[in-house]
Amino acid sequence: MWLTFAQWKKFGDLYGRKLFTAIWRTYFIVLVPIYVTLLCIGILSSVTTYFTA
């Protein structure tokens, strides 16, 4: 993986940089809603436990 980064930096491969950006954005778009959903579930669970205990 580091070899790929070194190659992109050496040759200035724009396609590689765009590919990396595309992969990062895809992970971000997929993982952020999951993270926010789990965060909300955790907060609701804590509040529910606090008031019912």
Image (spheres, rainbow, N blue to C red):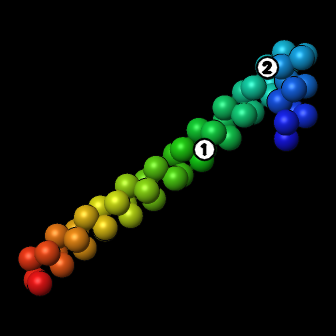
Circle 1: element type: helix
The answer to which image quadrant residue 44 occupies is bottom left
Q: Position of residue 33 (x, y in %)?
A: 43, 53
Circle 2: element type: helix
Q: Position of residue 2 (x, y in %)?
A: 85, 36
Q: Is 13 situated left or right of 52 in this image?
A: right
Q: Where is residue 26 in the image (x, y as percent from the top left)?
A: 60, 44
Would you place residue 20 above or below residue 13 in this image?
Answer: below
Disc 1 + disc 2, Cβ < 8 Å: no
Q: Please tell me which residue is depicted at 9% across the width and 77% down the height of the picture.
A: 51
Q: Name the residue under label 1.
A: 26
Label 1 crowding class (10 Å Cα cut-off): few <14, some 14-19, many 20+?
A: few
Would you place residue 46 above or below residue 35 in this image?
Answer: below
Of the pair 13 and 42, the residue shown nearer to us: 42
Q: Is 35 situated left or right of 53 in this image?
A: right
Q: Please tell me which residue is depicted at 87% across the width and 26% down the height of the picture.
A: 6
Q: Name the residue under label 2.
A: 14
Q: Please tell me which residue is depicted at 10% across the width and 83% down the height of the picture.
A: 52
Would you place residue 15 above or below residue 36 in this image?
Answer: above
Q: Can you say which quadrant of the picture contains the C terminus? A: bottom left
Q: Is 12 situated left or right of 42 in this image?
A: right
The answer to which image quadrant residue 18 occupies is top right
Q: What residue type is labelled 1?
A: Thr
